[in-house]
Amino acid sequence: MAYTTFESEISVRPDDIDMNNHVHNARYLDYVLAARYDQMRSCYGMSMEQFIERGLGWVVNTCFIQFKRPLAMGDTLRVRTCIGDVGSTHAKVDFQILKKSNGKLAADGYFDYTLINAATGRAEKLPQDVIDMYSI
Amino acid sequence: MAYTTFESEISVRPDDIDMNNHVHNARYLDYVLAARYDQMRSCYGMSMEQFIERGLGWVVNTCFIQFKRPLAMGDTLRVRTCIGDVGSTHAKVDFQILKKSNGKLAADGYFDYTLINAATGRAEKLPQDVIDMYSI
Amino acid sequence: MAYTTFESEISVRPDDIDMNNHVHNARYLDYVLAARYDQMRSCYGMSMEQFIERGLGWVVNTCFIQFKRPLAMGDTLRVRTCIGDVGSTHAKVDFQILKKSNGKLAADGYFDYTLINAATGRAEKLPQDVIDMYSI
Amino acid sequence: MAYTTFESEISVRPDDIDMNNHVHNARYLDYVLAARYDQMRSCYGMSMEQFIERGLGWVVNTCFIQFKRPLAMGDTLRVRTCIGDVGSTHAKVDFQILKKSNGKLAADGYFDYTLINAATGRAEKLPQDVIDMYSI
């Protein structure tokens, strides 16, 4: 099964820059999070808010990032994400962050998300409509 | 009416440092917020969590900061706050941030907080026990 | 003397949202900073990087913010800034943050910046070309 | 070769809390970074500042985190790090974040750091005194 890759554009903000004059490592997680929010709403047809309305939530259980090239002030990024795997209670999302100006890879990796019941905090089986929605 | 000044110690974290190798301006708000949370619980006897349990919340309506001396990696701060004024639906909190190593003033200013009803988001009259609690 | 108001569009990122489900207070400073960087480069014709190349820097000496309406996930902002006053070693910048969807004011206030010599950290007289550049 | 595990205590700040009322995922990277800065100085005998003075720097090339239990407002953490492996131009650091109140594991994983020449940005062979310093 091949899943579709979607892309969001994000601009580096001055407060993302750290003492080394590059984007702070932790902000890469925020860029991927921002891209997922954007793509859930505009590409998958079910926004994070809609998951919350159904009493569901996604929490990260694992995160893996490879930092390839530093990002700097003024950079615009293309953040690509793609479902890597869907399990009974989780979904793995592969990502790539590219520098828009030269198309070069700045970072890649994956986030593995567990679907939870917002009331109990426990893992919840992915409803069939969510599986279908993510199978594009 | 003179109010008591309380103090909390906070250490600069590496992620607080910006591209100029100093603590990022916006983090000063976080230091004051952290000091207030600490002092609400341990000095005033009513934690933010307890306000929330009562269906109340504090939101900042105005913030004023004077940056006097830069803060750097490795600095420990003494964050002093003191009630400056209590009105019918708000409380003004004066603050000072001092560098622990030399006692010098790094920043001062105030936050004016409005008490809100968490359900409606509207301003709420300060209950008498809150006024009493803050009158120390 | 009337100065021109410039505007930059900024989208709220998920990591800007705090425990109250609104944009965290401190992030408003980051939005204004981001707008200034953008406008220095594209509207005033002298980017922050160019100040740095000349051995100069701008540091905030005072910040004043009035929070009018909360900002939330999914909001896009119009951040307007305008020179309020230019002194011998400082420039005051007035700002307004509007919610794009309804044009309503979310926050306003000002930042007062001191021009510094990057090598010494001391206040520096504004060069004439900078005064001219800012007099639009 | 067995390396020593060191521990630093870090308190959650209110601005670390996200819209789900837990510590935001990206802040775990900041906690490990803060622990490493602390331990480089006080346990290994060579602070990040001293690396910088020698024209060296450490950059993260890979980061892996498993989130085990959420962290919340008011939590204090014990951040343990331990050298996992030292290569010719890199050092892998294993970490564990424990909740102080109950000793339970909140997250674990590793950071792989490349030593770079600050002037060129290129990978640099670990000097023998650094290898020795890290071999405790």
Image: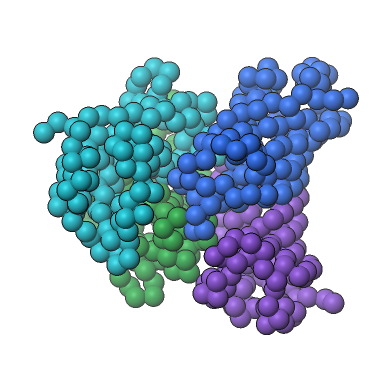
Chain colours: A cyan, B purple, C blue, D green
Left or right of A133? Residue B97 is right
Q: Nearer the viewer, residue A128 or B49?
A: A128
Q: Which quadrant holds residue A10?
A: top left
Number of on-image labels: 0
- In this rendering, the answer to whether B131 lies above or below A67 is below
- In this rendering, the answer to whether A114 lies above or below A94 is below
Please name the residue shown 52% across and 58% down the image: C20
- Decide if residue D28 is in sight here: yes
Q: Residue furthest left?
A: A1
Q: Nearer the viewer, residue B5 or A47?
A: A47
- Decide if residue B96 is in sight here: no
Q: Which quadrant holds residue B108?
A: bottom right
Task: Return the x and y of residue B46 as percentages of the image width and height.
Answer: 59, 78
Please name the residue shown 61% across and 80% down the image: B45
Please name the residue shown 67% across and 64% down the image: B123
Q: Nearer the viewer, residue D25 or C60?
A: D25
- In this rendering, the answer to whether D24 lies above or below B131 is above
Left or right of D5? Residue D35 is right
Screen quadrant of the C terminus of chain B: bottom right
Screen quadrant of the N terminus of chain B: bottom right
